Image (tube, rainbow, N blue to C red):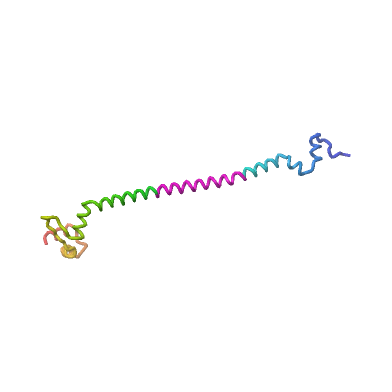
């Protein structure tokens, strides 16, 4: 009769006498599975932190752009304030809103409604007329 351990080395005989779970825990497959699980367990938090870092860097870049835009707008507003507080602006506002003028200055008031009426009456109604004919009509009338 054949023996079960026939043809096995002494190390294999000892290993075959051990229970299955001990042989499984000592096998290379088990160690490979354990290392693979450890690598996966470590990589998830690492990938999450990399993703969060990218999001934070994008937010920082957006905030820097917003900051630059606000600085430009602030400078424009400062320039506008400086202009509005200048003598030139005060004189312009006095002329337009209050109707004031400098000494020895003549003021001419142009009625826009009459100007548009005059301009529209000098142009022929037919829009198919050549432009050079319109000019001739304008100057000869």
The magenta segment: 41-66
- What x and y, as percent, mark residue 33? 67, 43
Q: Quadrant of the N terminus?
A: top right
The image quadrant that residue 28 belongs to is: top right
Q: Is residue 123 visible?
A: no
- Majority secondary structure in the magenta region: helix
Q: Residue at x 67, y 43 (%)?
A: 34
Q: Residue at x 20, y 55 (%)?
A: 92
Q: Is residue 97 visible?
A: yes
> For this rendering, which residue is in front, 21 or 136?
21
Q: Is residue 135 magenta?
A: no
- What x and y, as percent, mark residue 38? 64, 43
Q: Quadrant of the C terminus?
A: bottom left
The image quadrant that residue 121 belongs to is: bottom left
Residue that lies at the very extreme toward the right in this rendered image: 1
Q: Is residue 53 magenta?
A: yes
Q: Is 78 located above or below residue 14 in the figure?
A: below
The image quadrant that residue 32 belongs to is: top right
Tally the marks: 0
Q: Is residue 8 left or right of residue 43?
A: right
Q: Is residue 72 left or right of residue 1?
A: left
Q: Residue at x 83, y 38 (%)?
A: 5
> For this rendering, which residue is in front, 134 or 112?
112
């Amino acid at each position: 009769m054949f023996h079960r351990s026939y043809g096995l080395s002494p190390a294999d005989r000892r290993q075959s006498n051990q229970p299955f779970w001990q042989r499984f825990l000592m096998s290379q497959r088990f160690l490979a599975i354990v290392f693979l699980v450890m690598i996966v367990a470590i990589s998830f938090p690492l990938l999450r932190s990399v993703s969060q870092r990218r999001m934070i860097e994008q937010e920082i870049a957006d905030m820097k752009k917003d900051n630059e835009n606000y600085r430009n707008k602030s400078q424009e507003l400062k320039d506008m304030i400086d202009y509005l507080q200048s003598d030139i602006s005060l004189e312009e506002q006095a002329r337009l809103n209050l109707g004031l003028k400098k000494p020895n200055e003549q003021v001419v008031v142009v009625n826009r409604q009459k100007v548009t009426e005059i301009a529209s009456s000098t142009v022929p109604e037919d829009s198919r007329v050549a432009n050079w004919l319109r000019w001739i009509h304008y100057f000869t009338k």
